Amino acid sequence: MSWKDTEAAVLQRLEARLSPENWKWLRGAVNWEAGDLDEASTTEVRLWFNRPSNKNGINDTGLCRTWIWQSWIKIQAGVVDPVNGNLRSYWYQTVEPFYNTHSLWPEEEPQRGGDTFEDHLYEQVLGFIGDFVRHRVFFYRPEWQFQLPSDSRYIIGRDRAKFIFYTEKEGLWESHCVPMAEGGEDQLELKITAFSTKGQPPFVAVEHLANELMNLPYPVANPVILACSDFDPWGLRIAEQIDAKMRFFGFKSVTTYRLITLDLFTPKNLKGAKDLSKMTASRTDIQHWLDVTGGVHGEAKGIHCDVVNRSRREQLFKDIRLGIRRGDLADRFPLVKPVPMEQLSPADEPIGRLYT
């Protein structure tokens, strides 16, 4: 069976499975008139994806989305191997060589805030893959075999796997995540799941964690996320993201709490808080954060969760474990209100960052 036969079968399944909105998006995202891009000549590529207004004369969005689609189909057809690497591996293995082969880079490389055209296209490709995921055409793991990002880690809790201590700080893995997962210094405390990322939780990392939790001998059905993120607008957004992304991957009930509250900081800590009032580009996010948290005594000042001292951190861990045992986490920590996925990607961020 050729990859085109596989494509026809996959399209038939997708038409039956996808929502009308997602099916419409897929039909508009891929250039169905284009032939096999692996076998195409440069003349054919430029004919199928011609856009004179672009610096390189190419409709990069249409080309890259079509390339991603054909790659996915060919993996299923056994024509090409799964990536079995990270998202950058896919770029180096396929997209960059294709642009090199057909000389699709612009002659004069434009600068975008210090980034090159290639940097910008790489970010776009991450976003394009994320678009297919967001529209539920495919996920990162099954056919692609995209690996867990190197800056994301997790340990499944041996006692209460459904409770997930999550932090956006990879540097807090040893001091925060490991004690929560291994039961403290004496390893006698409650052992819960621990998960860390570098900044915003990558969609592919959340997918890996969600898949493992769902496939335990006693599958997790309703995870409870304990989000340790910065006390600022971006920390709140990260807590909202981890909540939304876990829901996206099939958990019908997700409860997320914010662990970092104003009372964890000393007066000295608060004196060193960053003034956010003049950051006009993020004004909407700042106001949302102020409405939810109250800021620092009503002021738009932010502070990193890293600065919480050891004694208060130990008390936080104790409160978490007591809250789990007694079932009163809601009395100890503020709840994160669920936010629709489409509201989480601010316009001023790189395209691929939310979904990849």
Image (cartoon, rainbow, N blue to C red):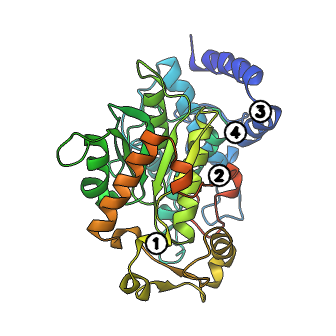
- At a point 40% along the width and 47% down the height, the residue shown is 322
Q: Secondary structure at mark 3?
A: helix
User: Which residue in the structure is indicated by mark 2?
Assistant: 61
* Percent of width and height locating residue 28: 77, 41
User: Which residue in the structure is indicated by mark 1?
Assistant: 263
| Disc 4: CA contacts within 10 A as few (<14), some (14-19) or many (>=20) | some
- At a point 41% along the width and 26% down the height, the residue shown is 81
**Which quadrant of the view contains residue 8?**
top right
What is the distance, in whole Å, between disc 2 and disc 3 at their CAs? 18 Å
**Which quadrant of the view contains residue 304?**
bottom left
| Mark 1 residue type | Asp
**Marked residue nearer the N-terminal end (4 or 3):** 3
**Marked residue nearer the N-terminal end (2 or 4):** 4
User: Which residue in the structure is indicated by mark 4?
Assistant: 30
| Mark 3 residue type | Trp
Extreme residue in the left direction:
186
User: Which residue in the structure is indicated by mark 3?
Assistant: 23
| Mark 4 residue type | Val
| Disc 1: CA contacts within 10 A as few (<14), some (14-19) or many (>=20) | few
Nearer the camera: disc 2 or disc 1: 1
Residue 43 seen by the camera: no
Q: Secondary structure at mark 4?
A: loop
What is the distance, in whole Å, between disc 2 and disc 1 at their CAs? 47 Å
